[in-house]
Image: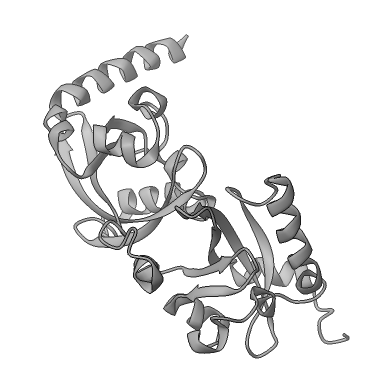
């Protein structure tokens, strides 16, 4: 019956966190507090607004629920590594990351994490600002400037599949300059047969609204400028402008090489 005791302990923890961090509710920025395991202990009103969750939907759950899979898969590892080495990668620094709302759409945010040591164990306090707060509604390139600060490759396309934005990390990943990709069709970044079928998938989605890829993340093959293929994890989200037109943002991270070798075997040469 250990589970029950743990449950009671968790309730008491959440209660003490609520008392301890209540002042955060009046702040303009989003704030979330997690423990060493990544469990959410506090979530202020602004964070509720930003993510579209009620506080009770998230407290006691792992913070990974607020991240696209590309980040979520690595987060436990980051916490464990920090716990064992004490090396600060994110703590006391500010960085741009992608987050996932309750409706599965993604948005870029500026994250600053500080550590709070207490008798009940270490707490991590995250301050959360939407990255494009100043640019929102600015139209044009301004709205994409937030994506330029991401460490991950980000590609934005319109309903026709034309590339509207290609951030510096995407230039590095693909080996294409932004100017050579923007205005071109996104299919140039894919190998056959995906290249040929992508436009059909896009049009089918726009006409049926059936979400097969949006809001999820999956592994796909990308074609780099030199013609080589790279397995990447793609997290895709959709944005609708005030005029009703849609854009799609893809965030891509490289899949580790070892995994790619297993999949490809040694057959590449024969081909």
Residue at 28% from the left image edge and 58% from the top image edge: 90
What residue is rendered at 44% in x and 13% in y?
2
From this view, report whether residue 33 is shown above or below residue 147: above
Residue 52 location, quadrant: top left
In front: 70, or 6?
70
In the picture provided, is 42 more to the left or to the right than 100?
left
- Image vertical order of residue 248 relative to residue 166, above or below: above
As drawn, is 120 to the left or to the right of 191?
A: left
Tell which residue pokes out farthest to the left in this image. 23
Q: Quick check: 21 above or below 246?
A: above
Q: Position of residue 224 (x, y in %)?
A: 64, 83
Question: Observer-nearest residue: 248 or 13?
Answer: 248
Q: Residue at x 49, y 82 (%)?
A: 171
Of residues 169 and 212, the one drawn nearer to the viewer in this rendering = 212
Lateral position of residue 168 relative to residue 203, left or right: left
- Report x, y in % for residue 18: 20, 23
In this view, the residue farthest toward the front is 243
Q: Position of residue 130 (x, y in %)?
A: 30, 53
| Image quadrant where one finds the C terminus | bottom right
Could you tell me residue 131's position as x and y percent?
31, 59
Residue 19, quarter of picture = top left
Name the residue at 60% across, 49% down. Answer: 216
């Amino acid at each position: 019956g250990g589970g029950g005791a743990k449950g009671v302990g968790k309730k008491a923890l959440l209660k003490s966190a609520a008392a301890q961090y209540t002042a955060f509710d009046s702040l303009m920025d989003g704030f979330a507090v997690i423990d060493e395991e990544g469990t959410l202990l506090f979530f202020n009103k602004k964070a509720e607004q930003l993510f579209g969750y009620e506080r009770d939907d998230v407290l006691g759950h792992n913070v990974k629920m607020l991240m696209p899979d590309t980040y979520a898969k690595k987060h436990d590892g980051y916490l464990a590594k920090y716990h064992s080495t004490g090396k600060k990668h994110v703590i006391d620094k500010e960085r741009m990351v992608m987050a996932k709302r309750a409706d599965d759409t993604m948005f870029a945010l500026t994250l600053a994490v500080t550590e709070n040591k207490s008798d009940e164990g270490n707490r991590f306090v995250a301050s959360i600002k939407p990255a494009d707060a100043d640019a929102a509604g600015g139209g044009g390139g301004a709205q994409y400037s937030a994506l330029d600060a991401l460490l991950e490759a980000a590609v934005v396309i319109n309903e026709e599949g034309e590339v509207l934005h290609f951030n510096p990390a995407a230039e590095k990943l693909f080996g294409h300059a932004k100017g050579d990709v923007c205005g071109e069709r996104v299919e140039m970044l894919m190998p056959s047969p995906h290249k040929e079928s992508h436009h059909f998938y896009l049009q089918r989605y726009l006409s049926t609204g059936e979400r097969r890829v949006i809001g999820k993340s999956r592994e796909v093959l990308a074609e780099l400028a030199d013609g080589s293929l790279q397995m990447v994890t793609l997290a895709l989200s959709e944005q609708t402008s005030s005029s009703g037109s849609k854009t799609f943002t893809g965030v891509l991270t490289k899949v580790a090489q070892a995994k790619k070798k297993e999949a490809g075997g040694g057959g590449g040469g024969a081909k």
